[in-house]
Amino acid sequence: MLRKLIFTIGIFGIILFCFASIKHLLLGSSAWDLGIFEQFTWLIAYKSINSVSSLRGISPLQDHFFSPLNTH
């Protein structure tokens, strides 16, 4: 029973990997969002929370909600 479960999980993982790889190769993955949030993380860690992103021209707080802390 355990062997059948491991085999099923392995086949399912391979199928998901193939679909994700094809989507990425066809430029369907959203690397733009990953780049935006990576830059926001860097801006918060090394500068300040009100620093302006070069990708979007807004601060990290303005991406999700309006706050009086936003000065840009």
Image (tube, grey):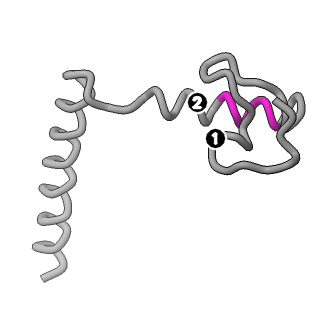
Q: Is residue 6 above or below residue 14?
A: below
Which x, y percent locates residue 52? 77, 24
Q: Quadrant of residue 70?
A: top right
Three-letter amino acid code at the position of disc 1: Asp
In this view, 63 is above or below 25: below
In the rendered image, the residue lying farthest to the bottom is: 1
Q: Marks 1 and 2: CB-CB under 8 Å?
A: yes
| CA–CA distance in space, label 1 to label 2 | 10 Å
Horizontal side of residue 65 vs 43, given as left or right: left
The image's mark for residue 9 is: none
- Exactly how many numbered labels are in the figure? 2
Which is in the foreground here, disc 1 or disc 2? 1
Residue 28 percent location from the top left of the image = 26, 29
Kindly identify which residue carries mark 2. Answer: 36
Residue marked by disc 1: 63
Q: Position of residue 58 (x, y in %)?
A: 70, 28
What is the span of residues highlighted in magenta in the rendered image?
Answer: 39-44
Locate the N terminus by quadrant.
bottom left
Q: Is residue 41 magenta?
A: yes
Q: Is residue 69 magenta?
A: no
Quick one: which residue is furthest to the top in this view? 54
Q: Nearer the viewer, residue 35 or 13?
A: 35
Q: From the image, give the main secondary structure of the stretch colored magenta.
A: helix
Quadrant for the C terminus, please: top right
Compare marks 1 and 2 and give the one earlier in the sequence. 2
Image side of residue 57 versus residue 13, left or right: right
Secondary structure beneath label 1: helix
* Residue count near mark 2 (Cα–Cα under 10 Å), binned few <14, some 14–19, many ≥20: some
What's the amino acid at mark 2? Ile
Above or below for 65 versus 59: below
Residue drawn at x 17%, y 30% is 22
